[in-house]
Amino acid sequence: MSRFPFPRYPNGWFQVAYSDELAPSGVLPIHYFGKHMVLFRTEAGVATALDAYCPHLGAHLGYGGTVKGDCIKCPFHAWKYDTTGACVEVPYATHIPPKAKVKPWHLKEVNGLILLWNHGEGAPPQWDIDAIEEYGNAEWTPYERRRWKIKTHNQEMAENAVDSAHFHYVHGTVEQPKTVAEVKGHVLHVKSETKMRTPMGKVTGTVESISQGFGYALTRFTGIVETLLVASTTPIDDDYVDVRFSFTVKKLANGDVTSTVGAAFIREIDRQLGQDIPIWENKIYVAPPMVCDGDGPIGLFRRWSKQFYPASAE
Ligand code: FES
Ligand SMILES: [Fe+2]
């Protein structure tokens, strides 16, 4: 039985790779949403995701498949599939079986990430992910990346942002932050003011996060130094999620200070996540939760969450 009373794979955009992991003609096997898929980049540079298994005799296109033009060639008998998943060539046959097709996935490449659209009922993308001005900007550092595999659910991790009481008790922030949350369609906007203990003493800062569904969130921190965290959480299977944090720091006039302060800040977030993990991995989901007046906007968060599951999940 599932630990969670909602579907394992919410709808939305989810990171499946970084753009620079997939060179032109590159091929990567990926496994998310309990499914095996192949990610490849055409010679012209278009990133594509298809279901992994060749309908001919079942080879995994991600293991030994090769890119030819805008197609991927199966490693087993050289059938070729285009970016829509249609078989366009069987080199030793005169007729291509008309049903030879692999399922394509909606992909989007933005901000250095490759994102895949998942929808429980197969609907096309319902929102877009915008380019951010910090990415590829000379005034900001290149991404510093961190990655974890955690035994939890996207919704549980996302709830952390509105759980203002835990920041003090789990993470040791000096005070409980004041949290204001607002919902607009698929976007959850949370703003907090926080005091953190840092190597430079107590620092007051703001934390502003914009979650677009459960897969992708931008968190901007001010205080020590301006930092942007692009946080992505992608369900792998019934138990685990793949978490990638990409940090970029606004450069200060002194490059050494940028890297020292940036590194200290990233260590702090790293430390905080390390504190959350054992809680997430072992907790249960309480519905309805027994909240008190000092808690953050957990009810608002849970109402917002429902839209990412099929209506039939109610
Ligand atoms: S299994 Fe792919 S071409 Fe035969
Ligand atoms: Fe936390």
Image (cartoon, grey):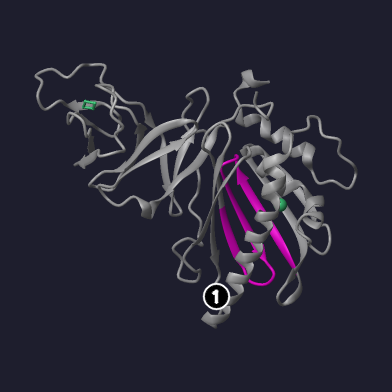
124 displayed left or right of 66: right
Q: Residue 153, how many percent across, how many down?
A: 63, 37
31 displayed left or right of 71: right
Q: Nearer the viewer, residue 16 or 44?
A: 16
Name the residue tied to disc 1. 259
- Tell me if residue 127 can be seen: no
Q: Residues within 10 Å of mark 1 (few under 14, many from 20)?
A: some
Q: Residue 3, how many percent across, how many down?
A: 68, 30
The quarter of the image holding the N terminus is top right
Q: What stretch is highlighted in magenta?
A: 204-230
User: Which picture quadrant has residue 70?
Assistant: top left
- Mark 1 Cβ and ligand 2 under 8 Å apart: no
Instruction: Please give the name of the residue rendered at 38% of the width and 34% of the height, measured from the top-left corner.
Output: 37
The quarter of the image holding the C terminus is top right
Instruction: Please give the name of the residue rendered at 58% of the width and 61% of the height, measured from the top-left corner.
Output: 228
Q: Residue 268, how many percent across, how many down?
A: 66, 64
Q: Is residue 245 above or below residue 291?
A: below
Q: Is residue 228 magenta?
A: yes
Check disc 1 and give the amino acid type.
Ser
Q: Does the magenta stretch include residue 245?
A: no
- Tell me if residue 156 can be seen: yes
Q: Residue 7, how many percent across, how many down?
A: 61, 27
User: Which picture quadrant has residue 101?
Assistant: top left
Instruction: Please give the name of the residue rendered at 17% of the width and 19% of the height, measured from the top-left corner.
Output: 96
